Amino acid sequence: MKIAQRKIIITGAASGIGRALLVRLAAYPCQIVAADRDAAGLAAAVAQSVGRATIFSFVGDLAQPAEIDRLLAYARAQIGGCDLCFANAGFAYYEQSGQADWQHMQRLFELNTFAPIYMALRLRELDPERPYRVVITASAMAKFGVPGYALYAASKAALDRFAEVYRYELAPNGRIALVYPISTRTNFFRAANASTPPIPWPSQSAEQVATAVIRGVERGQDAIYPSRLFWWAWKISGIFPPLRIAYQRTQRRALKRWAQQRERF
């Protein structure tokens, strides 16, 4: 898919992968609606994104369906709709699963899972004849869970199953792609807990992920793996499960050390 002249929505555009995407896509002659709930961060990201693109800012909490509808209406009014959507907004908890807390879980799934699925369905409803592509940032944890991120991994694995089946239900003019980044060196992990958690190995930069995502879109890929190392590790662990178990055990030990350090402070 060519990016030039596209009408694009980017969610989670104020930081991390979303911001890196915005900066890179600004180089193309296209129209972009950049969305985030962090108004100051979004303004800084837009100011950083210099190029041939025309960029509009949208501030809203996309964990709420009414805000997603408002975003789509705004995109229609400002740029005439959307034919390429990067659903990137999301967050994580780093924690030892323990006390049952419905609201704690609900907030995570609303933004990580419900919002991108709702966005994909609404794009199809709003303009059934218009060709479009939705690119959802999932996670390597959708394929390979890591201790400390049980809820986060579940929220991303749900997207994996949705996309697998939804591809058979899409209209001929619709496409959906998932991105499976490994640990990304951004404020994402700091936001996962007030006490900065250990970053799972291996890791990569948001800029590396954004470059891989744009390349994958241009090549028409439905599954984008920014890390070839992870892709090979995931495939090999399917043949040799002890590899996965050994890695997960090292991450379990890291979680225990982190929990013990928190107790001391």
Image: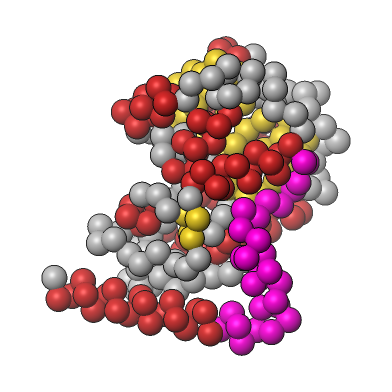
Q: Position of residue 103 (x, y in %)?
A: 37, 55
Q: Is residue 25 above or below residue 159?
A: above
How did the renderer colour the structure?
A: secondary structure
Magenta segment includes 20: no
Q: Which residue lies most toward the bottom here?
A: 242
Residue 20, given in percent of the width and then of the height, sits at: 49, 38
Q: Quadrant of residue 243?
A: bottom right
Q: Is residue 66 visible?
A: no
Relative placement, left or right, of 108 versus 178 is left
Q: Nearer the viewer, residue 91 or 212?
A: 212
Considering depth in this image, is 142 or 121 the residue closer to the camera? 142
Tell me the quarter of the picture where residue 199 sits. Answer: bottom left
* Above or below: residue 222 compared with residue 92: above
> Residue 45 location, x and y as percent?
41, 29
Residue plotted at (82% across, 36% down): 171
Q: The magenta stretch spans which residues?
A: 219-245
Percent position of residue 258, x then y:
29, 73
State the residue at coordinates (38%, 60%).
Answer: 93
Measured along the vertical axis of the image, is residue 110 above or below residue 34?
below
Direction from residue 221 to residue 157 in the image, left or right: left
- Image position of 221 with respect to 5: above or below: below
The residue lying at 51 percent from left, 43 percent from top is: 207
Q: Quadrant of residue 105?
A: bottom left
Residue 232 within the segment the image draws in magenta: yes
Front position in the image: 213 or 140:
213
Q: Quadrant of the C terminus?
A: bottom left
Q: Principal SS element in the magenta part?
A: helix
Would you say residue 88 is visible in this rendering?
Answer: yes
Question: Which residue is rendered at x = 82% and y = 49% of the image?
Answer: 168
Q: Quadrant of the N terminus?
A: top right
